[in-house]
Image: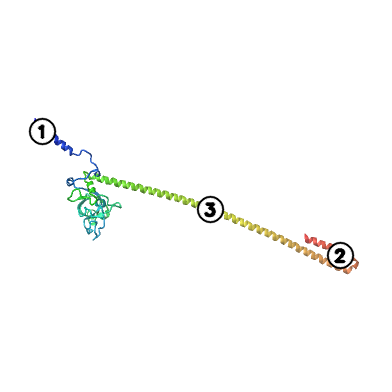
Amino acid sequence: MKAVAAIVLTTLVSTSLASSHGHTTPRRRHHNKGPVDAEQAIVKRATYSGMATWYDVGTGNAGACGQFLNPNDHVVALNQPMYGDLGQRSSWCGKTIIISNGKKTATARVEDACPTGGGNCFYGSLDMSVGLFTEFTSLGTGVFPITWSPVGEGGGNSGNNGGGNNNDNNNDDDDDGDDDDDDDGQAAAAAAKKKAQQAAKQAKEEAKSQAAAASRSAAAAAAASSAAASRSAASSRASVYSVTKAAARASASVSRVAAKSRASVRASKSAAAASSALSASAASATAATPTGNLNNFANLYDGLSKIIMEQADS
């Protein structure tokens, strides 16, 4: 009985220990996991996911790690979040990594750093030399997805920024990390798109407002111009009327003066004729009539003079 009890007790203890080391909780995303120790890192090598791009290394140029490079070398520039401080040499420098795009695999060394920006070199991404990039595809492709991991090491080093980045990636499902990066990228893209749409909408509204203001200004200017033209036309008509009226008055005055002149001429002619007739009569009377009839002649002369004066006044 004691032997049986011992066997049962041993079985229960073994089962309890096995249960305590099992995965009793759902898998969590890698950014929720704590740092892994060296033993755990050796069991599972860290694998990273990102995008591959290429850049012109330039013969004889030194990378961030201080080594002179050649475009044909299989070297990569590590993304800035994993490299760390760009002003210092990262612990990633000189490490060999193995890279795969799902169809081809190649090895390379970390010899440079790629600053994050312009949509490139986010966490997990690599900027490749021309020689390395063309091992996978043509330069015209520009960018393609990759997975990579350090060769012969577990856990990897994060560089000079504390080692947190690599430890974050030591998890049971690297796809979770990809999902997080994708979620962050999608959120950033959505925010940028929304901001661009808002800016475009605001610019459209401002342009519409400016166009309306310009239209109102043009209409006001046209109305003012039309009013000025109307006033000018009215002024011109008034001026023409004034000139015409003055000309009519002048013409009437000239006509009156001419009529008076003609009347004066006729009166003068009549007076001259009467005077001539009177002179002739006087001469005839003087010759034929005795001196005693001079009084009659004087009376006749006075009568004729009155007649002539009346005609001249009319």
Residue 277 percent across, percent down from the top left? 82, 66
Cα distance between the residues tagged 3 and 2:
84 Å
Q: Which tag is nearer the camera, tag 1 or tag 3? A: 1
Image vertical order of residue 164 relative to residue 255, above or below: above
Q: Residue at x 87, y 68 (%)?
A: 286
The residue beneath circle 1 is 6
Residue 143 percent across, percent down from the top left? 27, 52
Q: Residue at x 9, y 31 (%)?
A: 2
Q: Nearer the viewer, residue 105 or 184?
A: 184
Task: State which tag comes first along the sequence, 1 or 2.
Answer: 1
Residue 300 visible in image: yes
The residue beneath circle 2 is 298
Q: Quadrant of residue 57?
A: bottom left
Cα distance between the residues tagged 1 and 2:
197 Å
The residue beneath circle 3 is 224
Mark 2: few, some, or many residues within 10 Å (few <14, many ≥20)?
Answer: few
